[in-house]
Image: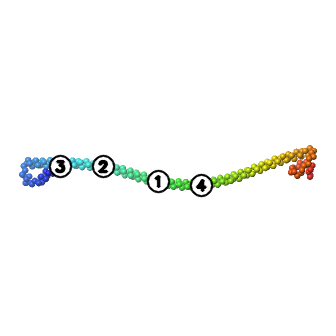
Amino acid sequence: MEGSKEDLSKISEEEMLRWSKEELVKRLRKVENEKMNLMVEHGNLMKDVNRRLQLHLHEIRGLKEVNQKLQDDNQELRELCCFLDDDRQKGKKLSREWQRFGRHTASVMWKEVGMYQQKLKDLEARQETLLRENVELKEMVLMLDEERSGAGSRSSIDSQASLTNLNGGSATRDVGDGSSTSSTGSAGSPD
């Protein structure tokens, strides 16, 4: 096609005027045919360009949708990060409060344990004192029992002796033996 254009541009007007009608019609049809071919080719190129533009527009729309979705996801992630950061801050604060509470509770527990240990020591000391006192009281009770049983046997002997005196017995009693004298008196009595 370009070759025919070059040919026409090289041909002078005088030479063209010498052509016959048939030659001019033939050349005109050839040029029109080339022009039609160029227009068809141009139309095909335009269709191809339009098709590519449509593809690019469709791709751009898809990318815009993906971009919007990514922006939405990004916003959600930011909000989630803010929420998690707030939650982390609250967790740290709660952890510090629990640590404070734990230290306070441990301190109170140690004080109470110390008080209870002191009370336990006091109770143990008191228990030992009571045990000693109980042992002493038992010893005193045993001594009193022994004295009473010993005095009881002597008084029974004395009463038997006084009975023999009443019955006319002549046995003399030692006045200083610690036994009580009968109300009727005895033979050796200073009364």
Task: Tell me how far mark 3 sits from mark 2, CA to CA.
Answer: 31 Å
Q: Which mark is residue 110?
A: 4
Q: Residue at x 49, y 53 (%)?
A: 91
Name the kind of residue labelled 3 in the image: Leu
Q: Which residue is at the front of the view, 167 or 65?
A: 167
Residue in view at x 23 percent, y 48 percent: 47
Q: What residue type is labelled 1?
A: Arg
Label 1 SS: helix
Q: Does the rendering let one see residue 77?
A: yes
Marker disc for residue 88: 1
Answer with mark 4 or mark 2, whichever residue precedes in sequence.
Answer: 2
Across and down, in percent, residue 46 comes to 22, 49
Question: Tag 1: Cα neighbours inside 10 Å, few (<14), some, or many (≥20)?
Answer: few
| Category of crowding for the residue at label 4, using alpha-carbon neighbours closer than 10 angstroms: few (below 14), some (14–19), many (at least 20) | few
Q: Is the residue marked by circle 3 packed among few (<14), some (14-19), or many (20+) residues within 10 Å?
A: few
* Residue bearing mark 2: 59
Pointer 3 residue: 38
* Discs 3, 4 touching: Cβ within 8 Å: no
